[in-house]
Image (cartoon, rainbow, N blue to C red):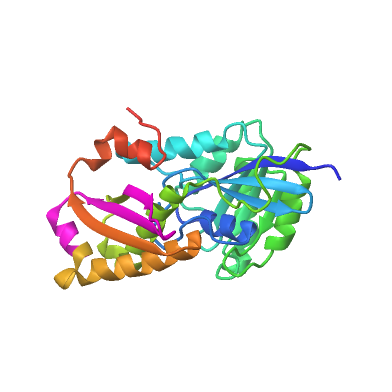
């Protein structure tokens, strides 16, 4: 049997559902998901298999107008994730429609040499009458080889999309073992899981300008893992929000994150969290290296 293997760059505006789509195609969770825009910060590769084909899905940060160094690093990560891909998949929120953030992305794809497909997501909650209008307009901005209508959340259309993606991949040997679903390290994955809990539990209270870094990751003699993480915020008031009354909120964040990290690793986890105020954490080169982003001047 001839093997196939290729890279698919998944791009789009914030909150288009890219991470949910990648998780759905892989068949399990590899990227964190929250309703908060710009949840994905780094290029994360999910690895999906369809028959004799291995697909490396690069879940990129949402492309938006950058205002600060972290924003610029994320946008650079998104576009560099698309470079030299075997296929670029533009994911558009079918419910949100063609907002001001979608048009420039589609037009930027117009002259790129890579094959391109359009995936209109969230069709389960979208206005059905507008979906074809959106697709027609997007194909005027950038000519796509195929257009797909799916719901990553419900799975509608995902099996057919996955088969089509596999058909478009080039012949070549697989790059990863069959049972590997992501290229993220355990250390990075642990930090992402805690950051997801910050978003899910604090919602609008949590400032966008916060981050999580794993300071210590070590194995104990009994086979369990000890993890120390630092949650970085810009102001003391933000620290107070994360701590909660008597530290109750931080304890709950840690409890849920610990269980999910343990489930991900398949072993017991001892998780220690603390919150640090650093007004300039996003100007720290070492932090960018730790979370997998390039430093952008």
Task: Work out whether residue 175 can be spotted.
Answer: yes
From the viewer's perspective, tell me whether residue 243 is left or right of residue 108. Answer: left
Residue at figure coordinates x 54%, y 45% from the top left: 183
Residue at figure coordinates x 52%, y 41% from the top left: 105
Residue at figure coordinates x 26%, y 36% from the top left: 284
> In x, y percent, where is residue 48?
66, 52
- Tell me if residue 106 is in the magenta stretch: no
From the viewer's perspective, tell me whether residue 146 is left or right of residue 211. Answer: right
* In the image, residue 229 above or below residue 249: above
From the viewer's perspective, tell me whether residue 16 is left or right of residue 162. Answer: left
Task: Work out whether residue 66 can be spotted.
Answer: no
- Tell me if residue 233 is in the magenta stretch: yes
Quadrant assignment, res 120: bottom right
> In x, y percent, where is residue 261?
43, 61
> In x, y percent, where is residue 92?
55, 54
Q: Nearer the viewer, residue 191 or 206?
A: 191
Q: Nearer the viewer, residue 108 or 76?
A: 76
> In x, y percent, where is residue 170?
76, 38
Quadrant assignment, res 124: bottom right
Q: Nearer the viewer, residue 273 or 142?
A: 273
* In the image, residue 251 above or below residue 211: below
From the viewer's perspective, tell me whether residue 256 is left or right of residue 279. Answer: right
- Quadrant for the N terminus, please: top right
| Magenta-tinted stretch | 214-241
- Quadrant for the C terminus, please: top left
Q: Residue furthest front?
A: 221
Residue at figure coordinates x 31%, y 39% from the top left: 287
Q: Residue furthest right?
A: 1
């Amino acid at each position: 049997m001839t093997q196939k293997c290729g890279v698919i760059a998944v791009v789009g505006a914030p909150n288009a559902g890219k991470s949910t789509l990648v998780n759905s195609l892989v068949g399990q969770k590899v990227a964190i998901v929250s309703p908060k825009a710009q949840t994905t910060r780094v290029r994360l590769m999910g690895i999906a298999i369809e028959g004799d084909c291995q697909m490396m899905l690069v879940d990129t940060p949402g492309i938006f107008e950058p205002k600060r160094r972290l924003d610029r690093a994320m946008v650079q990560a998104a576009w560099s994730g698309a470079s030299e891909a075997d296929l670029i998949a533009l994911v558009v929120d079918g419910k949100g429609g063609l907002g001001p953030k979608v048009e420039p992305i589609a037009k930027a794809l117009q002259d790129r040499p890579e094959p391109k497909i359009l995936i209109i997501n969230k069709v389960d909650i979208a206005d059905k009458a507008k979906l074809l209008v959106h697709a027609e307009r997007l194909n005027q901005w950038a000519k796509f080889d195929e257009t797909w209508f799916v719901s990553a959340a419900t799975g509608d259309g995902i099996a057919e999309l996955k088969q089509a993606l596999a058909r478009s991949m080039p012949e070549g040997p697989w790059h990863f073992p069959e049972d590997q679903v992501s290229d993220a390290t355990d250390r990075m994955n642990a930090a992402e899981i805690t950051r997801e809990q910050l978003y899910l539990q604090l919602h609008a209270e949590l400032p966008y300008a916060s981050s999580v870094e794993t300071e210590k990751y070590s194995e104990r003699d009994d086979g369990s893992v000890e993890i120390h993480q630092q949650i970085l915020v810009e102001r003391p008031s933000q620290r107070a929000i994360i701590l909660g009354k008597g530290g109750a909120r931080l304890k709950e964040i840690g409890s849920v994150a610990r269980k999910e990290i343990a489930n991900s690793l398949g072993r017991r986890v001892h998780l220690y969290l603390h919150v640090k105020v650093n007004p300039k954490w996003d100007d720290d080169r070492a932090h960018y290296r730790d979370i997998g982003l390039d430093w952008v001047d």
